[in-house]
Image (cartoon, grey):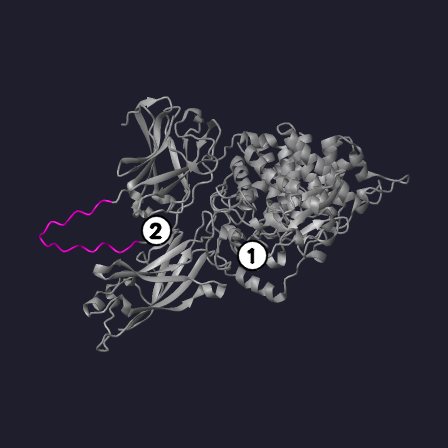
């Protein structure tokens, strides 16, 4: 949720008195702020600010990206049914659905904030404003090593827009999808986007058409695409040309069909003249056609404005003064800042821009007219606060406008000195004593209003108490007029984050870096890897127990967080011992298994219960298996069962659970237990099976048991196919091709390569379902190197990796390694490098060993091992 900017009282979603009182009560419970010395590093802050957009990505291609805790989500958007199109678009079905499969690709884009709707106006504003900051201050991104990252983010916007703007054979727009999702529906969910299903939370799409226009949003996107053209035209002229073509077409469409886009009560626009002007200034910048500017400032013979300016200014003698700033709904400040730079001799454009900047300084930089004392009143600590709801976004937008203005008026450092003080306040020099940039500084706001970072699996903003992930670089809402901030997850006024909040913030940081931070450095090896956790585990408690039965509830957990993902192959086992029944002449047939409660039933499915199976029949050890195969599983599921022993022929019961493996240490409250092993796709991922029962010695020499031959197969995927790379990134899989279970701790893999230098190297396992902490990696130099290998990386498994059943596989083992000085490798002469294998396939130049014996692949010819 955001507070609209212009006409706030008319457009604000007003809290009820009861809710207001509740909020006040909550605020009284907030602990004192942690105070730390301010820390200023514009390069680091700029670097981190971009990662917020990685957290906001929607669609495919997110898994394995820059943030390990984000994965692919809302993939249903890529297959939007034609049957759901508005009636007026049915006649254009061949354009929207050229392959005729009845589906339209609307995937990609960005979530708006802590929610997961792709709202129209904030997304178009964020796209254009991010592009603006990059266009003006690109040198900052280059110097800090962030250019590639920034272009990746901008393309995530433009790629989505380019495919959802539909042109007819004359190059005219017939439709534009500007919004996916519904705010009322979406805001009923609080959890990671990876778990949000369109079947439960529908995601309707909104299209701009001639009959139902959205000229405000269409113009905003046209501006963004025109800026994208400017940012890409030198390096990617073909891509840039596509952006400009659709920018022009979309602007023409917006001009012809005027009307505000649907908002559903969220982020509705006041009018469209400002967005149309914003598009026009950038189309002029891209094409040099003055007609675009005339559409803004056209006047009649009497000096009355007939262009877009008529919305706010009556005539050329009017001294209009703008007290807002560049923001998601009203972009006049951006328009006039840009006009003032494009037409430096136009005193009126300069006045409109400069007066607004001086107003924001609160009088620190006075107006040229000493009689003009109209200024924004700062907080007691000197912070420029326009509105409590997201105050920092407005403050940073004013800073961006100031920095752009100063770029073209180099002597006006009085304005940017003011902006620098404002950014230092945001960075931690404020009465709260912490940074309003998540993950930046010595102390920062810890509880942004953000579902994915919070990581709840039970739709509860208060559980867990602390966020599972750091939302790197997110600009939280900020303080109020008294310099007070409330660091609560539930408080979306003070602690919301959003793509429009960070948009101007990124550009402002880039401008500050070039003026005040050229000696600052970004962080190396960022972001740091998160601590590994048990993603899958079991806890249990005893419900009832007597001499005839044991009733147990098992709670199975999928707490996957790197990234969150459904598991459709979980199972667990409960082991028990019936030696007391065997001694009484009974068998396993005397044990009945009863289901008392199955949480999956309430979700329209059922847990598959099988067994009992003999684990060691001679010693009376059996198990039952609970299987959730094929069921989309996340969070927790409970399963309550009973083991009931029948009476013997003398009507006596002999049940004794005290020797049951899985019963040990269980009480009447939930206890995490490693004696209920958990499996994913047949691979042990948590816990342990019963210890072997010692075989009594008889003095006779037992006959040797024939050894089962063990064998494996290795699959490989090349994830960095270039010849010269800074990071080598092979993804591997191991499959047990033998006929018996295999302890992974017996297995070693070797990836053969040339190190291209003598420096130290670092190995990382980003993800594997057996647990990244259970994968080891070590570098070995060959004593007699060959042209294709002077080293190998040996991948091993700890005992915690578990066992592979016959025919089972590990799934992806996502590894990478690099030199500690990040100098490049030449992969072209690496023995194990197979650039053609961009999809998993066998690579016999990666070797596998069991107990030190080569069982798969071929070692490089002529090597001499150390």
What is the quadrant of residue 371 in the picture? top right
Asked whether, in this view, residue 449 is left or right of residue 704, the answer is right
- Secondary structure, mark 2, is strand
Q: Residue beneath label 1, please?
A: 491
Q: Quadrant of the C terminus?
A: top left
Is 690 included in the stretch rendered in magenta? Answer: yes
Residue at the farthest bottom position: 651
Question: Up-down: is 646 above or below 816?
Answer: below
Residue at the farthest left position: 699
What is the quadrant of residue 537 in the picture? bottom left
Q: How far apart, in angstroms, are the residues tagged by discs 1 and 2?
A: 41 Å
Q: Residue beneath label 2, please?
A: 684
Quick check: can you spot residue 733? yes
| Crowding near the residue tagged with mark 2, few <14, some 14–19, many ≥20 C-alpha atoms within 10 Å | many
Asked whether, in this view, residue 780 is left or right of residue 217, the answer is left
Q: Position of residue 195 (x, y in %)?
A: 51, 54
Front-lying residue, 291 or 157: 157
The boundaries of the magenta stretch are 688-707
């Amino acid at each position: 949720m955001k507070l609209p900017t212009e006409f706030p009282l008319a457009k604000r979603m007003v809290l009820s008195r009861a809710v207001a009182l509740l909020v006040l009560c909550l605020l009284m419970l907030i602990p004192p702020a942690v105070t730390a010395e301010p820390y200023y590093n514009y390069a680091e802050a700029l670097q981190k600010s971009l990662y917020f957009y990685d957290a906001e990505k929607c669609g495919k291609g997110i898994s394995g990206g820059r943030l390990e805790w984000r994965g692919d989500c809302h993939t249903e958007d890529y297959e939007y049914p034609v049957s759901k199109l508005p009636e007026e678009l049915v006649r254009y079905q061949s354009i929207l659905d050229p392959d005729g499969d009845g589906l339209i690709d609307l995937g990609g884009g960005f979530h708006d904030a802590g929610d997961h709707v792709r709202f129209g106006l904030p997304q178009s504003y964020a796209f254009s404003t991010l592009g603006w900051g990059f266009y003006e201050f690109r040198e900052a991104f280059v110097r800090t090593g962030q250019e590639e990252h920034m272009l990746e983010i901008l393309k995530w916007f433009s790629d989505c827009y380019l495919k959802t703007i539909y042109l007819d054979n004359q190059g005219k727009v017939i439709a534009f999808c500007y919004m996916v999702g519904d705010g009322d529906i979406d805001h009923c969910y609080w959890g990671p986007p990876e778990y949000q299903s369109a079947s439960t939370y529908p995601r309707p799409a909104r299209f701009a058409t001639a009959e139902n226009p959205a000229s405000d949003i269409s113009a905003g996107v046209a501006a963004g695409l025109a800026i994208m053209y400017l940012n890409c035209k030198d390096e990617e002229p073909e891509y840039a040309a596509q952006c400009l073509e659709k920018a022009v077409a979309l602007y023409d469409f917006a001009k012809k069909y005027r009307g505000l886009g649907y908002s559903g009560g969220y982020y509705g626009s006041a009018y469209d003249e400002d967005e149309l002007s914003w598009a026009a200034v950038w189309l002029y910048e891209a094409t040099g056609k003055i007609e675009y500017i005339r559409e803004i400032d056209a006047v009649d013979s009497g000096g009355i404005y007939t262009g877009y300016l008529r919305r706010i200014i009556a005539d050329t003698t009017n001294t209009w003064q703008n007290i807002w700033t560049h923001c998601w709904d009203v972009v006049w400040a951006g328009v006039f800042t840009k006009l003032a730079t494009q037409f430096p001799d136009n005193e009126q454009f300069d006045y409109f821009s400069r007066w607004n900047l001086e107003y924001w300084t609160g009088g620190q930089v006075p107006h040229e007219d000493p009689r003009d004392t109209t200024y924004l009143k700062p907080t007691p600590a000197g912070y420029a606060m326009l509105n409590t709801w997201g105050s920092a976004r407005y403050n940073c937008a004013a800073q961006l406008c100031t920095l752009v203005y100063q770029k073209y008026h180099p002597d006006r450092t009085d304005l940017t000195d003011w902006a620098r003080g404002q950014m230092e306040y945001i960075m931690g020099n404020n009465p709260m004593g912490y940074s309003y940039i998540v993950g930046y500084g010595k102390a920062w706001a810890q509880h942004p209003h953000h579902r994915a970072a919070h990581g709840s699996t039970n739709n509860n903003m208060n559980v867990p108490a602390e966020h599972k992930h750091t939302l790197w670089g997110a600009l939280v809402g900020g303080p109020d007029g008294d310099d007070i901030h409330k660091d609560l997850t539930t408080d979306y006024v003070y602690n919301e984050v959003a793509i429009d909040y960070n948009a101007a913030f990124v550009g402002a940081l880039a401008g500050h870096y070039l003026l005040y931070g050229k000696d600052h450095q970004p962080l190396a090896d960022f972001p740091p890897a998160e601590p590994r956790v048990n993603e899958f585990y079991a806890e249990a408690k005893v419900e009832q127990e007597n001499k005839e039965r044991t009733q147990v509830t098992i709670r199975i957990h999928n707490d996957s967080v790197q990234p969150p993902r459904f598991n459709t192959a979980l199972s667990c086992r409960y082991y028990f011992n019936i030696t007391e029944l065997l001694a009484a002449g009974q068998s396993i047939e005397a044990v009945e298994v009863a289901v008392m409660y199955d949480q999956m039933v309430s979700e329209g499915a059922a847990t598959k219960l099988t067994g009992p199976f003999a684990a060691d029949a001679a010693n009376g050890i059996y198990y039952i298996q609970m299987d959730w195969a094929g069921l989309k599983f996340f969070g927790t599921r409970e399963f309550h069962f009973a083991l009931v022993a029948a009476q013997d022929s003398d009507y006596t019961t002999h049940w004794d659970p005290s020797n049951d493996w899985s019963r040990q240490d269980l009480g009447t409250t939930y206890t995490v237990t490693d004696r209920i092993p958990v499996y994913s796709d047949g691979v042990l991922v948590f816990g342990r099976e019963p210890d072997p029962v010692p075989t009594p010695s008889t003095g006779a020499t037992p006959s040797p048991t024939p050894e089962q031959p063990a064998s494996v197969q290795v699959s490989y995927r090349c994830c960095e196919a270039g010849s010269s790379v800074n990071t080598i990134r092979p993804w591997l899989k191991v499959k047990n091709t033998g006929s018996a279970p295999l302890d992974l701790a017996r297995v070693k893999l070797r990836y053969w390569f040339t190190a291209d230098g003598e420096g130290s190297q670092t190995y990382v396992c980003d993800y594997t379902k057996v647990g990244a902490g259970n994968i080891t990696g070590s570098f070995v130099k060959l004593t007699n190197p060959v042209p294709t290998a002077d080293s190998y990386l040996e991948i091993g498994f700890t005992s915690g990796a578990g066992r592979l059943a016959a025919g089972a596989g590990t799934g992806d083992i996502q590894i990478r390694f690099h030199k500690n000085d990040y100098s490049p490798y030449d992969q072209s002469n690496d023995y194990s490098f197979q650039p053609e294998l961009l999809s998993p396939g066998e690579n016999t130049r990666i070797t596998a060993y069991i107990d030190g014996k080569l069982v798969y692949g071929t070692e490089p010819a002529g090597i001499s091992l150390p």
